Amino acid sequence: MLSVVVPAYNETGAVGPAVQAIGKVLRDGGIPYELVFVDDGSTDGTWEEITKAAEQDPAVRGVSFSRNFGKEAAIFAGMEAAVGDCCAVMDCDLQHPPEKLPEMYGLWQQGWEVVNGVKADRGRESGFHGFAAKSFYRIMSKAVRIDMSRASDFKLMDRRVVDTLLALSERRRFFRALSAWVGFRATEVEFNVAERTVGSTHWPMVSLFRYAVSNIASYSSAPMQFVTVLGVLMLLLSIALGVQTLVNWAWGKAADGFTTVIILVLLIGSILMISLGIIGYYIAQIFIEVKGRPRYLVSRICGQKEKRV
């Protein structure tokens, strides 16, 4: 059986169409399935729509968080609730095309343990957003040593891969990076990002920036190395200025006074504050891990859960 995990946050108008579209594709393909919707603390009627769908369709189940814990937590909660022999993850807004699921399922039947949905294009987005996304995935690719330039959350994984991901103990999880990091036999299926038919994106630029910073700090030490690079640059600048001062003194020319001192103090102070901020952020990440709080809290469930053999 195929479990399809669908995270949802304020997707009142998208739940019904998602149930219909995904269900039709899988029924037409003769694939036994279940749909696991995870309500990530929505403030609209998303949970009511999931409950209604579960009452009408026995293949639908729902999990609701006590508050908003984020998409990564919703993905892992859905995988933990899933009972299928393989598990797919896709967005509720259907920007991940359900029509690709039978192809991905067929590749899994051939022995592939991870079937990655990769973007043939990124759809409509601003030039700045595209540049920022490429920069982020360039850093993440170096961190996990795998090309993530076209990565997405749209994946189908064997139960062994799902269990391996769930066994990881870290609190800060980035699904796209972890699913690449664990390895296993993987292949790819290209898809075009569809336009949203209902509602609008829940990822404003500020949230995307925080999301990127959090994941970079969780999987890469590059910002800490940036602090070292700044220190080396300041050392070289200090040597250059020292040599210039000595040369001016030897030629009987007085070095510039307070202007130079003020500029140096401001420059060094700024670099020190930036460096302390980067180090402080890593310490905060350690603090979050050490506390060991649950990654999410489930308040309600709906639908009939089958037992996995």
Image (cartoon, rainbow, N blue to C red):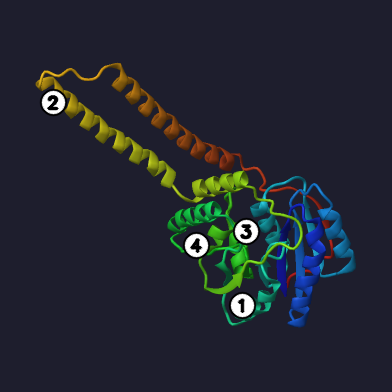
Mark 4 packing: few (<14 Cα in 10 Å), some, or many (20+)?
some
Q: Earlier in the sequence, mark 4 or mark 1?
A: 1
Q: What is the C-alpha distance between the residues marked 3 and 2?
A: 64 Å
- Residue on which disc 1 sits: 108
- Secondary structure beneath disc 1? helix
The quarter of the picture where residue 61 lies is bottom right
- Secondary structure beneath disc 3? helix
Q: From where the camera sits, is residue 249 visible?
A: yes
Mark 1 packing: few (<14 Cα in 10 Å), some, or many (20+)?
many
- Residue at figure coordinates x 53%, y 64% from the top left: 150
Amino acid under disc 1: Trp
Which of the two discs, 3 and 4, sits closer to the camera?
4
- Residue at figure coordinates x 85%, y 69% from the top left: 58
Q: Earlier in the sequence, mark 4 or mark 2?
A: 4
Q: Earlier in the sequence, mark 3 or mark 1?
A: 1
Mark seen at residue 149? 4
Residue 2 picture location, percent across and down:
71, 73
- Secondary structure beneath disc 4? loop
Q: From where the camera sits, is residue 305 visible?
A: no
Q: Are marks 4 and 2 in contact (CB under 8 Å)?
A: no
- Residue on which disc 3 sits: 166
Q: What is the C-alpha distance between the residues marked 1 and 2?
A: 71 Å
- Secondary structure beneath disc 2? helix
The quarter of the picture where residue 270 lies is top left
Q: Are marks 3 and 4 in contact (CB under 8 Å)?
A: no
Mark 3 packing: few (<14 Cα in 10 Å), some, or many (20+)?
some
- Residue on which disc 2 sits: 247
Amino acid under disc 2: Val
Q: What is the C-alpha distance between the residues marked 3 and 4?
A: 25 Å
